Amino acid sequence: MSAGGERGNTVAERKIEVINKFGLHARPAAMLSQRASKFKSEITLHKDNIEANAKSILSVMMLAAEVGSFITVKAEGEDAEEAVEALAKLFEEKFGEE
């Protein structure tokens, strides 16, 4: 994670491995977008050379992130660190899948 940005905004990012069995399919993408939408920060997901708006389920699904792939979660804004932590937790909990 790193700090900085304009007007006191914080920038935070974390590289996360997709560990749930089916990757970022519709249900996890919806969960991620709903969680991201609760934050004021701008939040993007990066996989390979693709960038997705974390607050858009369709954008998240366009990443086609399968199990074993890596995604970088990046947030910029007053609650950036909290946003990255909250989204990382979803991945760590495998989106509630077994």
Image (tube, rainbow, N blue to C red):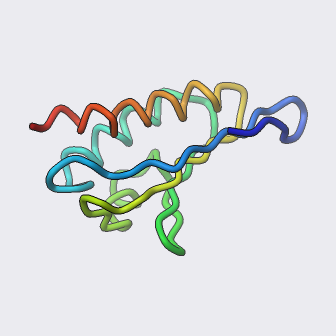
Query: Within the image, what quadrant is residue 39 found in?
Result: top right
Q: How many marks?
A: 0
As drawn, 60 above or below 50? above
The residue positioned 43% from the left and 35% from the top of the image is 87
- In the rendered image, the residue lying farthest to the bottom is 49
The residue positioned 33% from the left and 35% from the top of the image is 92
| Relative side of 79 to 67, left or right | right
| Relative side of 5 to 61, left or right | right
Residue 64 placed where, x, y %? 30, 67
Residue 81 placed where, x, y %? 63, 29
Q: Nearer the viewer, residue 18 or 51?
A: 18
The residue positioned 50% from the left and 71% from the top of the image is 50
The residue positioned 52% from the left and 61% from the top of the image is 46
Where, quadrant-wise, is the C terminus in this rendering? top left
| Relative side of 23 to 90, left or right | left
Where, quadrant-wise, is the N terminus in this rendering? top right
As drawn, 67 above or below 75? below
Q: Nearer the viewer, residue 74 or 6?
A: 74
As drawn, 73 above or below 40? below
| Relative side of 10 to 44, left or right | right
- In the rendered image, the residue lying farthest to the left is 98
